[in-house]
């Protein structure tokens, strides 16, 4: 889902509207107008019933916005940055930078949204009877919105991801077991069962009962399955990133030259690499079989060509520890972290003996992950990704997957202590 258009900021949080929101706004306006026309607004002019229908639809999404603000403001209190709140076809979603570091913090964030909806429902349903004598239309509006907020709260409390109830269930299991991953597994399984149940009930309602609401129930079920599938894929990726080591993904994208060779040899090497490959491989330098440093192309740019035969690589050596590096025995998820912190987007890989044994970049890492999943990527896809220094085939979410793992790893470490 794209981010949509930013309307404004609330407490520093961008509020965005996705194009699909206008579809559901139109549908709910029609639905509410029909209810007003045949109910409290019977006999009113069309402009009145349509205005009330539109107002009810807009206030519905104000309620959804307040629900998401409840999540967001508590998340900020828990030290989590909120990137944005987006209203879209299925309601609203708050995008956060990372999950809470503690189970109880995650529980508070998840529970805040339904609590806001329950409070809104209580206020509106209590106020509605007080306005019946003065304005039946206003009383009907408050009753509708109160009932919708009550349903919104209760629906979101169903115990399955991606609903708030699923997040609460995950946090409770996490707190009880000390494992975030176990919490995700339980809440994901529960969410999958709920989504399948919604699809079956929606199909029955539409085909047997002949109710149009069945289509909406099926749509919610399909949406839930899609989100649930995303959680399952994240768990699979997390397992792969834990099981694989840096050595499983490392390639050997560096060249080796002797320290006593002239600078012209470096120039010749770059020419051999070709125009499309120029400067892509690090050049490591040895002296009598020992690693002594590395060299970049800066001397070729700074010195006149006449000096290339007089000066050697030894004259321009740079220490190896300047290069971002990683031991080959570390789990692959730590390479994702290190790559995101590396300006070059690649790392020098060291063997257990402390010697350079290879390199790893985003393409190497992504290829290893896909190979573990049984997918061999075509060379063209890998080449295109390497030119852009990005993860291949949609694996751009790997840094976010690792972010969600970090707190889980720290919880495991604390439980072992």
Image (spheres, rainbow, N blue to C red):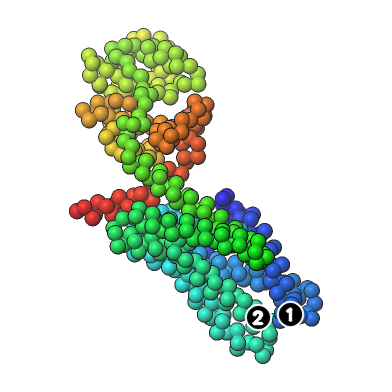
Label 2: element kind: helix
Relative side of 85 to 203, left or right: left
Q: Residue 52, how many percent across, how many down?
A: 70, 74
Residue 226 appears in view: yes
Residue drawn at 65 percent across, 61 percent down: 207
Q: CA distance from mark 1 to mark 2?
A: 9 Å
Give the mark, 1 or 2, whose residue is nearer the N terminus. 1
Residue 17 appears in view: no
Query: Does 144 sit above or below residue 173?
Result: below
Q: Residue 45, how many percent across, how many down?
A: 80, 77
The answer to whether the residues at label 1 and label 2 have Cβ atoms under 8 Å apart is: yes
Residue drawn at 57 percent across, 50 percent down: 2
Residue drawn at 79 percent across, 74 percent down: 46
Q: Give the class, few, some or many, for how many residues have Cα within 10 Å of label 1's Cα (few <14, many ≥20).
A: some
Label 1: element kind: loop
Relative side of 68 to 28, left or right: left
Q: Nearer the viewer, residue 414 or 278?
A: 414
Query: Does 171 sit above or below residue 322?
Result: below
Query: Does 187 sit above or below residue 321?
Result: below
- Residue 400 — which label? none
Residue 352's image quarter? top left
Q: Nearer the viewer, residue 390 or 81?
A: 390
Q: Residue furthest left?
A: 417
Q: Residue 204, how many percent across, how many down?
A: 61, 62
Q: Please give the residue where the numbered disc 2 appears in the rendered image.
A: 140
Q: Residue 315, how many percent across, how many down?
A: 30, 17
- Residue 41 — which label? 1
Query: Does 356 sit above or below residue 182?
Result: above
Residue drawn at 63 percent across, 60 percent down: 215
């Amino acid at each position: 889902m794209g981010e949509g258009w930013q309307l404004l900021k609330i407490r520093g949080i961008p509020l965005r509207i996705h194009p699909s929101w206008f579809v559901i706004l139109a549908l709910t306006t029609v639905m509410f107008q029909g209810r007003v026309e045949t109910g409290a607004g019977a006999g009113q002019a069309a402009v009145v019933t349509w205005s009330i229908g539109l107002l009810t639809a807009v206030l519905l999404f104000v309620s959804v916005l307040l629900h998401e603000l409840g999540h967001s403001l508590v998340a900020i209190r828990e030290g989590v940055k909120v990137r944005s709140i987006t209203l879209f076809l299925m309601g609203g979603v708050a995008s956060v930078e990372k999950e809470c570091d503690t189970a109880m913090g995650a529980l508070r964030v998840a529970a805040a949204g339904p609590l806001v909806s329950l409070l809104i429902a209580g206020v509106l349903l209590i106020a509605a009877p007080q306005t019946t004598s003065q304005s039946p239309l206003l009383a009907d509006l408050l009753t509708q919105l109160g009932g919708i907020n009550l349903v919104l709260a209760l629906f979101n409390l169903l115990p399955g991801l991606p609903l708030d109830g699923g997040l609460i269930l995950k946090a409770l299991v996490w707190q009880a077991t000390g494992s975030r991953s176990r919490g995700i597994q339980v809440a994901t399984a529960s969410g999958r069962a709920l989504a399948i149940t919604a699809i079956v009930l929606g199909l029955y309602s539409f085909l047997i009962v002949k109710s149009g609401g069945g289509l909406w129930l099926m749509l919610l079920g399909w949406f839930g399955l899609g989100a649930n599938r995303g959680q399952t894929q994240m768990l699979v990726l997390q397992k792969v990133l834990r099981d694989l080591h840096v050595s499983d993904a490392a390639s050997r994208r560096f060249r080796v030259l002797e320290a006593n060779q002239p600078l012209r040899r470096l120039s010749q090497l770059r020419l051999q690499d070709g125009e499309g490959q120029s400067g892509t491989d690090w050049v490591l330098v040895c002296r009598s079989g020992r690693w002594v440093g590395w060299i970049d192309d800066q001397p070729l740019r700074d010195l006149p060509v006449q000096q290339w035969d007089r000066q050697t690589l030894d004259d321009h050596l740079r220490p190896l520890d300047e290069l971002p590096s990683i031991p080959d025995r570390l789990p692959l998820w730590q390479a994702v972290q290190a790559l995101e912190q590396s300006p070059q987007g690649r790392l020098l890989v060291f063997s257990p003996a402390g010697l350079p044994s290879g390199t790893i970049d985003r393409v190497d890492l992504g290829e290893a992950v896909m190979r573990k999943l049984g997918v061999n990527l075509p060379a063209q896809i890998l080449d295109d990704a390497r030119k852009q220094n990005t993860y291949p085939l949609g694996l751009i979410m790997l840094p976010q997957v690792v972010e969600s793992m970090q707190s889980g790893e720290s919880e495991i470490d604390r439980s072992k202590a």
